[in-house]
Image: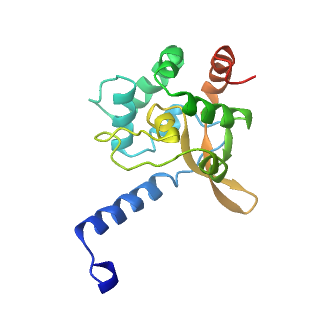
Amino acid sequence: MARLGLVSAKMLKNWYERDRIKKAESILVHENSTVSSIVNKYPAQWVDGICKSLELNTKGRKSKKAKMIAEKLKSDIHDVLEKLPEKSLEALAFVLKKDGIVKYSQVSRRFDDEIGFWWNEHPRVSTVGMLRSHGLLYVGKKPFGDRLYKVALVPQELRETLTEALRKKAIIR
């Protein structure tokens, strides 16, 4: 159909989904960004998807859910890590070794990063998608020089705890 210049419903859906992802990933982040500050900027579908992955209630305001997500990650990080596959933990270690923030292209070259927009309905199963849907890795834009780059970020308040937990699992040496 595309060769004939026709647009199918599936093509429109894919375009719409890619556009929504691009907008959601264009939020500004910095080295000291926190879980709550990022989650409050994320679309409701992603926030609810993170809540479901962390077994939290999806009812209520986004700001309340952002606080619940931050608290869950601070208090039960070991339980969250137990649910993740080894490859996702390796991807997390890769970002942590780079001081918790890295250009996204460095992550996407090494690890499967396929995601969709509807996290609340379709849980993520890619290596990076698992980290994102569990609230451990976030994507946004950060200025480097005079340009904005897409980056992967582990929130500042989780870095030390995650590094220590991954050392205990012998993922970070």
- Which of these two is toward me, 144 or 162? 162
Q: Is residue 79 left or right of residue 33?
A: left
Q: Is residue 164 left or right of residue 136?
A: right
Q: Does any portion of residue 15 appear in the rendered image?
A: yes
Query: With respect to residue 62, does 104 lie above or below?
Result: below
Query: Quick one: quadrant of the C terminus?
Result: top right
The count of marks equals: 0
Query: With respect to residue 75, does 113 lie above or below?
Result: below
- Which of these two is toward me, 128 or 112? 112
Which residue, as the protein is rendered here, is positioned at the far bottom? 4
Residue 81 horizontal/vertical position (percent): 52, 21
Query: Quick one: quadrant of the N terminus?
Result: bottom left
Q: Does any portion of residue 31 appear in the rendered image?
A: no
Q: Which of the 4 image quarters holds residue 32? A: top right
The structure residue drawn at horizontal position 42% and vertical position 38%, both measured from the top left corner, is 125
Query: With respect to residue 169, does 101 lie above or below?
Result: below
Residue 52 horizontal/vertical position (percent): 33, 29
The structure residue drawn at horizontal position 46% and vertical position 19%, both measured from the top left corner, is 72
Residue 89 horizontal/vertical position (percent): 58, 29
Residue 160 horizontal/vertical position (percent): 68, 22
Q: Which of the 4 image quarters holds residue 6? A: bottom left
